[in-house]
């Protein structure tokens, strides 16, 4: 089997301008922060990749960094924030000023969209959103009639990311990876994305078991502490002081640039 190791510089070049970029992890856990920082460095040096659509089941620090760097055009997430540490400052700044196209999403719309792609169909039916005003905000989400019961259902369109980036506890050189028990929708991202990149705390000769399997993964990048300052349990904890430092120092584009330059 082919080894799938690549450098971080090689990996970030797989993210193309305007693509749908999906980031794995959940809230402040196992976020691909090192990859995002490398992607921002490339953008600052070359002006690419910009105009991204960012997909995150829950978006946190890593997503706020991309927004602050001016790389994101559209957001698809059911939550964008830093939990107990407060609002995501750059998302809040730009969204309040109309600088972002924020797609109305919920857990249901994202989950059903990924399930539709996994099933190889154009949509997945469900009862979520029925009786709400959400369809008025998402005209692309239509209704269908169950041919057996006659019940009207919502039809959530399939979601297929161009690139998914997932941070793992450990991986092997063939692309197999372990992501721990808090998996979020990372397994679904691996099954639905055109390209899957895994940053890993540790790369071993082989794994005894895998949550993500090699045939789904296009690249493995060795990235020790690649989720910091978010947590990567049980390897290291959340660095709350760094998150507090970010939220107290950053409030607008000028303070964000000062923060980046000091890192």
Image (cartoon, rainbow, N blue to C red):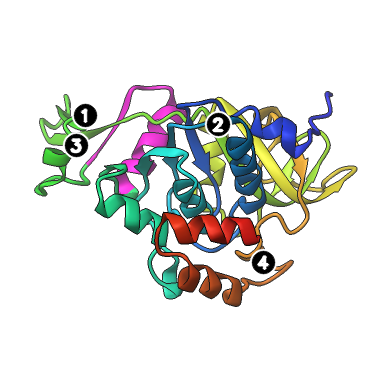
Q: CA distance from mark 4 to mark 3?
A: 37 Å
On screen, residue 140 versus residue 197, left or right, reads left
Is disc 3 surrounded by few (<14), some (14 to 19) or many (20+) residues within 10 Å?
few
| Residue 253 visible at all | yes
Secondary element at image label 1: loop
Q: CA distance from mark 2 to mark 4?
A: 35 Å
Q: Quadrant of the N terminus?
A: top right
Of marks 1 and 4, which one's residue comes earlier in the chain? Answer: 1
Residue, disc 1: 140
* Disc 2 to disc 3: CB gap under 8 Å: no
- Across and down, in percent, residue 186 comes to 55, 45
- Across and down, in percent, residue 7 comes to 78, 36
Of marks 2 and 4, which one's residue comes earlier in the chain? Answer: 2
Q: Quadrant of the C terminus?
A: bottom right
Residue at left 66%, top 43%?
A: 38
Q: CA distance from mark 1 to mark 3?
A: 5 Å
On screen, residue 113 versus residue 18, left or right, reads left
Residue, disc 3: 138
Of marks 2 and 3, which one's residue comes earlier in the chain? Answer: 2
Residue, disc 4: 233
Q: CA distance from mark 1 to mark 4?
A: 38 Å
Residue at left 54%, top 30%?
A: 49
Task: Label the magenta part by its dominant secondary structure.
Answer: helix
Residue 166 occupies quadrant? top right
Region of the chain picked out in magenta, as a range: 108-126
Secondary element at image label 2: loop
* Disc 1 to disc 3: CB gap under 8 Å: yes
């Amino acid at each position: 089997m082919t080894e799938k190791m690549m450098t971080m510089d090689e990996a970030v070049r797989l993210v193309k301008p305007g693509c749908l970029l999906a980031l794995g992890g959940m809230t402040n856990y196992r976020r691909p922060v090192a990859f995002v920082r490398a992607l921002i460095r490339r953008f600052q040096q070359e002006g690419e990749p910009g105009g991204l659509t960012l997909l995150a089941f829950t978006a946190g620090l890593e997503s706020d960094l991309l927004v602050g760097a001016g790389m994101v055009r559209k957001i698809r997430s059911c939550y964008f924030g830093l939990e107990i540490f407060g609002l995501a400052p750059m998302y809040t700044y730009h969204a309040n000023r109309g600088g972002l196209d924020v797609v109305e999403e919920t857990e249901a719309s994202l989950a059903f969209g990924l399930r539709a792609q996994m099933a190889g169909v154009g949509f997945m039916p469900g009862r979520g959103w029925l009786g709400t005003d959400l369809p008025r905000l998402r005209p692309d989400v239509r209704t269908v009639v169950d041919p057996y019961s006659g019940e009207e259902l919502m039809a959530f369109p399939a979601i297929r990311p161009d690139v998914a980036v997932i941070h793992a506890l450990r991986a092997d050189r063939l692309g197999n990876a372990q992501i721990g028990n808090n998996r979020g929708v990372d397994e679904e991202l691996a099954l639905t994305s055109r390209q899957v990149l895994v940053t890993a705390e540790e790369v071993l000769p082989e794994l005894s078991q895998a949550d993500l399997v090699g045939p789904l993964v296009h690249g493995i990048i060795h990235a020790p502490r690649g989720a910091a300052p978010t947590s990567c349990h049980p390897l290291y904890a959340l660095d709350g002081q760094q998150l507090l430092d970010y939220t107290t120092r950053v409030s607008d584009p000028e303070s964000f640039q000062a923060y980046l330059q000091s890192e």
